[in-house]
Image (cartoon, rainbow, N blue to C red):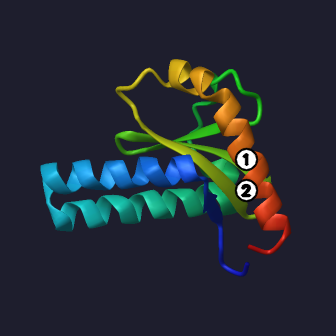
Amino acid sequence: MPNTYYTLTLTAEDDFRAARRWSNKRWGKELTQQYFKDLHKAAENAAKQPATISKKSHLTNIEELEIAVVREHYLVYVPSRDNHIIIVALLRQTQDVPAILEANSFIIQRDVKEALAAIENGK
């Protein structure tokens, strides 16, 4: 997977779709495109240069999870190997992030295992 710095779980894909729909309705296509470019760059930076990311790991009780601040959102991810992360959620900062992650810990762990298996199998 050359130049692939992150994998989205199915849950994260849903989060991104919902955020895009909301943003398009509220801000329009042009601002939404820029916002999602910023999210993409932040995800790549989290994978390529983890030490430079402003992390909010204290928001979760799940040891493997890391959280990067991206504008009005938290990008919730698990480092999977050098230069690659698995994004498990995209949450707005106004949400109760610890409660959401706690309530979904089983799903997050399952999604991460599936993503790791897919990565190992070259998918």
Residue underneath mark 2: 115
Most distant residue in the right direction? 120
Q: In the structure shown, which secondary structural element does the residue marked by tag 1 occupy?
A: helix
Residue 18 seen in the figure: yes
Up/down of 27 relative to 41, above or below: above
Most distant residue in the bottom direction? 2
Residue underneath mark 1: 112
Quadrant for the N terminus, please: bottom right
Task: Give the residue type that dot 1 points to.
Answer: Val
Q: How many dots with numbers?
A: 2
Q: Residues within 10 Å of mark 2 (few under 14, many from 20)?
A: many
Q: Nearer the viewer, residue 85 or 115?
A: 115
Name the residue rendered at 54%, 46% in the picture: 11
Q: Can you give x and y, in whole percent of width and height, for residue 54 in the image? A: 56, 41
Quadrant for the C terminus, please: bottom right
Residue 107 horizontal side relative to residue 16, left or right: right
Name the residue rendered at 65%, 36% in the picture: 107
Mark 1 and 2 residues: CB-CB less than 8 Å, in contact?
yes
Q: Can you give x and y, in whole percent of width and height, for residue 51 in the image? A: 69, 49
Q: CA distance from mark 1 to mark 2?
A: 5 Å
Q: Can you give x and y, in whole percent of width and height, for residue 55 in the image? A: 59, 37
**Which quadrant of the figure has residue 30?**
bottom left
Name the residue rendered at 76%, 29% in the picture: 63
Q: In the structure shown, which secondary structural element does the residue marked by tag 2 occupy?
A: helix
Which mark, by number, is residue 99?
Answer: none
Residue 106 horizontal side relative to residue 31, left or right: right
